[in-house]
Image (tube, rainbow, N blue to C red):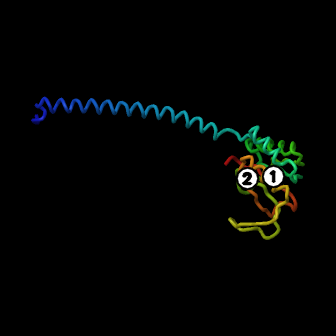
Amino acid sequence: MPAWWNSLETVTAISSHAKTLGFILGLLTALCGAIVFFSGKRVDALKAIRDADRRLTSIQHSQILDLMRDKPIGKVTVQCPIMSPEPRKFAKELAAVLKEAGWEVAFNDRVIFTQPTSGLEIWVHFDGPEPSEGASVTGDAPKRAETLLTSLRLAYLPTELRFNTSVPKDEVQLIVGFKP
């Protein structure tokens, strides 16, 4: 046996330090357990939010109507991917608000997109050659497209404006893609 093992003072000090260390490790274990418990509940709550269907809040509904009041409106085609329940449900809700605001709304839930789209996009006609991937395109959008874009964005619905050569001249399309 080492000499320190036979010393009362040394063994007492080691025992005291071991008790303190055991107490601290016990507290850390309890703290880690609490963190795991509460963060697990938060993860579940965040997953539920992420997986929930998009819905307009009553505030967004009112904001869109208020923002469109006395602004240029007209015909819009609301489109979503074929056989996609969540985008279709949200597109129907947006179409209903637009109708309530006085828009002439056509609804198309049978669209096959060559590339999956997510979020909200407003497509308007573009004269000119098909732009290359990532190219910046500018042009004049119909005033009602600007009304729609501004109203959706100010109602905290992130929306992009896209110029597209396949959109008929003077047509405005609201594309409701998959959840971002």
Count the labels in the image.
Answer: 2
| Secondary structure of residue under mark 2 | strand
Q: Is residue 38 left or right of residue 152?
A: left
Q: Is residue 83 placed above or below 131 in the rendered structure?
A: above
Disc 2 packing (10 Å; few <14; some 14–19; many ≥20): many
Q: Is residue 7 placed above or below 118 in the rendered structure?
A: above
Q: Is residue 145 placed above or below 139 in the rendered structure?
A: above
| Secondary structure of residue under mark 1 | helix
Q: Where, by quadrant of the figure, is residue 131 drawn?
A: bottom right
Q: Which mark is residue 161?
A: none
| Residue type pointed to by label 1 | Leu
| Residue type pointed to by label 2 | Thr
Residue at the spot 84% in from the left edge and 48% down from the top edge: 68
Q: Which mark is residue 159?
A: 2
Looking at this rendering, what residue extends furthest in the bottom direction?
A: 129
Residue 26, percent from left and from top: 35, 30
Check contact, mark 1 vs mark 2: CB within 8 A.
yes
What is the C-alpha distance between the residues marked 1 and 2?
9 Å
Q: Is residue 51 left or right of residue 148?
A: left
Q: Earlier in the sequence, mark 1 or mark 2?
A: 1
Residue 100, percent from left and from top: 87, 42
Residue at the spot 27% in from the left edge and 29% down from the top edge: 19
Q: Which mark is residue 148?
A: 1
Residue at the spot 10% in from the left edge and 34% down from the top edge: 1
Disc 1 packing (10 Å; few <14; some 14–19; many ≥20): many
Residue 104, percent from left and from top: 90, 48
Residue at the spot 47% in from the left edge and 34% down from the top edge: 36
Q: Where, by quadrant of the figure, is residue 44 drawn?
A: top right
